[in-house]
Image (cartoon, helix red, strand yellow):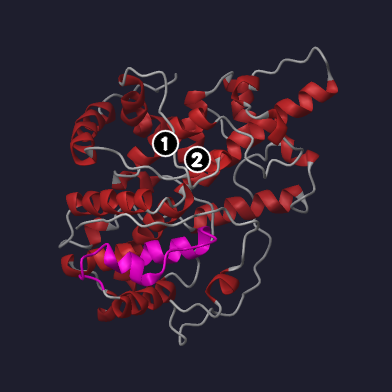
Amino acid sequence: MSSRSFNHTIRRPMKRMSTSAVFENDENVSPTCKEPKTIKRKRPVASRSMPSILNTSQEFGTPETFWDVLIEKDQECKASPVAFSQHPNLKPHMRVMLYDWIMSVCAELMLHRETFHLAISLIDRYLSKVPKLQNPDYKIQVSNLQLLGISCLLIAAKVEEIYPPKVQALADFTDGACTPVKMKAMEEIILEVLEWNCTYMTSIQWLAFYMQLMCKQDLLISRSSSRASTSFDPFLHDDCLVEESFTLPVLARDDFVECARVLDLCMTNVCYMNFTYSELAAAVVLYAFEPTEAVEKIIGYTQDQLSDVLRFMEPYIKEGKAEDRPGIVIPDLPKIGLHDLHNIQTAIKRLDELVERLEKRHVLASNNSSNLVG
């Protein structure tokens, strides 16, 4: 697998588009691939407490309904932890190679973190669903694993990027192994298997959501009392960019990038699928910020509820601490605005060696029943 650089200027979309809007009249999608009819469902019941800060804003409609939908989608889009065991011809190291390659492609094309994480999520969800369908056309072999990966990246880019790469540009990264025709056909199969459910919050978006809620909480506190404590103030940046809405990224870029790196590392392990995306992000936030009581109110989980995921995350969090550095350097990309640099996916050097070292740590950590922050 090889990769080459491309001169693309990527900007964030001004607003989210629906799945149908993303794929309608798209030159890269098959005209026979249609979105299924929308099915109305009963209002879900949230499985955890809603952050009280959401009650201060009506920009998304009723806060309770908004929160319930987030929780429901979080459960629906959880991949199966036995996904790869259902594909005996696919070995764990093959997934790591694919993971590393897709990350490198995203870094060279300056795609966003959301795009990378959604692509990996689509791959894992597809592999989780295929065995149950018993359709030979859906099977993934070693020979077409790269085709699955690049096609999922194509879908993710259409969802998350305002200017997604052309199908031919992505095909060029495969050195002829995946043609545009094959990618279009695979794209149709993926969307069919996943029932077009490809717009939801991944762990990286939950991370940004939690951190933005923390920033919004402090802004409200500072307005209500001049003597109020502002424990999260160090994590605010660019006062000129801070607005009342938490939809604008008013989070600390360096801290966000460090937390994002932990998520990047933990998702190399298929065991991450034992947890929801909100749990993975919540565990990172709970470890990175304090006081614990204040963080628990933001994430909607208690420390005890996250004990299992914290134990799983321990080796990956320790890896971040092990490196003697003041912070992860955000790359200087002239074509990307300063406000968006922290959102651009970066590659991890020698990821295969790092994963091997982390797996050994994970085995040791799994034998230790002590709580990470207990």
Find residue 244 and report its horizontal and vertical position in percent. 77, 38
In screen coordinates, is 225 left or right of 146?
Answer: right
| Image spot of residue 166 (x, y percent) | 41, 69
For image coordinates 83% across by 18% down, the residue present is: 225
Residue picked out by circle 2: 341
Point out residue 211 in the picture as x, y percentages from the top left corner. 59, 34
The residue labelled by disc 1 is: 331
Looking at the picture, which amino acid does disc 2 mark?
Leu
Report the quarter where the N terminus lies: bottom left
Question: Can you say whether 37 is above or below 74 in the image?
Answer: below
**Above or below, comparing residue 330 to residue 121 in the picture:** above
**Badge 1 density bin: few <14, some 14–19, many ≥20, Cα 10 Å:** few
Q: Give the left or right position of residue 315, taking residue 255 as reference.
A: left
Whether residue 226 is situated above or below residue 242 in the rendered picture: above
The answer to whether residue 304 is seen in the rendering is: no
Crowding at label 2, few (<14), some or many (≥20) Cα neighbours within 10 Å?
Answer: some
What's the residue at 56%, 19% (across, down)?
A: 290
Magenta segment boundaries in residue numbering: 151-178
Image location (x, y in percent) of residue 233: 65, 21
Tag 2–tag 1 contact (CB < 8 Å): yes
